[in-house]
Amino acid sequence: MHQPRSNCRLYVLLARDSSDAVIIRRGPSKRVQLVSWQRDEDKFASGQWFKGRIYERRCDLSPSGKYLLYFAASHKPPLYAWTAVSRPPFLSALALWPKGDCWGGGGLFVQEREIHLNHPAHQMDLAEKNSLPKHFKIGRTNEQAGCGEDFPIYHLRLLRDGWQPIEKEECNAKEKTEPLFHFNLPITYSKTRPAEASKRNNGDQLKMSICGIAEPNNPWYIVEYQIEASSGTILKELGRLDWADWDSNGDLLFAKQGKIFRSKNLIDSLELIDLRTNLYQEIAPEPWATRW
C-alpha cells in the first residue's frame, strides 16, 4: 500500500516495567532526536539531537525506562561507531564502548543493572575515563555477538518482548539493478494483546511483516501491520507503519507519517503528537542526565 512521503521516521522503545517510552525521531537522514513519552498521561518531552545515525533496532530501554542503551555512528574518526548508555531523552554517554565499525553493536538490558552487549570479545572494553556503578554487570548476548547488522539482536529483543516469529525470510533479489528487494516470504512476527486488557482481549494478534528493504525515498525496511482475531480473521489492515505495538493496557500504539497515535477500540485512532516540524538545534543535557 503506497503512503505519501514524510520528512521524518519514528521508532519507539517501550519500557517493560513502567509507562515510559522513548521515541527515536530521524529526519533529515543524518539528524536524530530523542523524545520521551510518558504513556500513562501521553506527555512528551523533546530531548537531545545527534548528528549521525542511531541504529534504532539495536537499541534498548532498561526495564524502568531510566536508561537507554543505543548504538550510534558518526562514520568518521575518532570513534566511527559506538554503543553507549544514557538517560533519555538525552544522549550524553554515562558509559561508552567504542565499536569502530557497524557490524553488530548495541545490546539488550537483561535487568535494570545488567546489559548484554552485541559486541565481539575484542570490542568489550569501556572507553578511557569511563566507569560503571557497582553491581552493574556487563556481558555478551551470545558467542556470535557482533555478527550481522540489525539481526539477530533485533530478533532477540522482539522475542523477549513477547513477539513470536511466524515465517522465515527468503530474499528475492530480482535484478541487480533493482533498488527494491522484496522477500518471497515476509519476516513475520505476531504479538498477543496483553492479558491486562482482559475485558477487551479475545486473543487478538498484532502481526508485523517485514516485506522487503531498500525502497527509494522510504524507510530501509518495508513493514506492514495487521490485526487478526484468534480465529485468524483479519480485523484491521493497518498497512505500512513506521512502528506499532500493544500498550500494557491493551491499547494499540503506532507511528505513521511523523505522528504517534493511540487506538483503544482498534477502530478509531487518536493523534497524540506530530513531530514532523521539529528542527535540529543544539541542546545541552540537563545536569541529572550526566550522572548515574
Image (cartoon, helix red, strand yellow):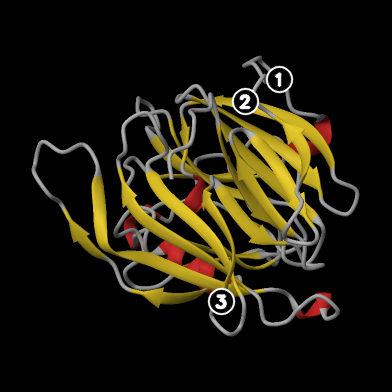
Q: Residue furthest right?
A: 41
Q: How far apart are marks 3 and 2 (CA)?
A: 42 Å
292 sits to left or right of 143 = right
At a point 8% along the width and 41% down the height, the residue shown is 176
Q: Distance between the residues labelled 3 and 1?
A: 48 Å
Quarter of the figure with residue 247: bottom right
Q: In this view, does 170 lie above or below 96?
A: below
Q: Name the residue under label 2.
A: 49
Does the rendering let one see residue 139? no
Q: Mark 1 points at which residue?
A: 283
At a point 67% along the width and 82% down the height, the residue shown is 203
Residue 169: image x %, image y %?
A: 28, 67
Q: How far apart are marks 1 and 2 (CA)?
A: 7 Å
Q: What element carries label 3?
A: loop
Residue 163's disc is none
Residue 14: image x %, image y %?
A: 69, 57
**Figure label count:** 3
275 sits to left or right of 108 = right
Q: In this view, does 258 lie above or below 277?
A: below
Q: Nearer the viewer, mark 3 or mark 2?
A: 3
Residue 233's disc is 3
Does the rendering let one see residue 128? yes
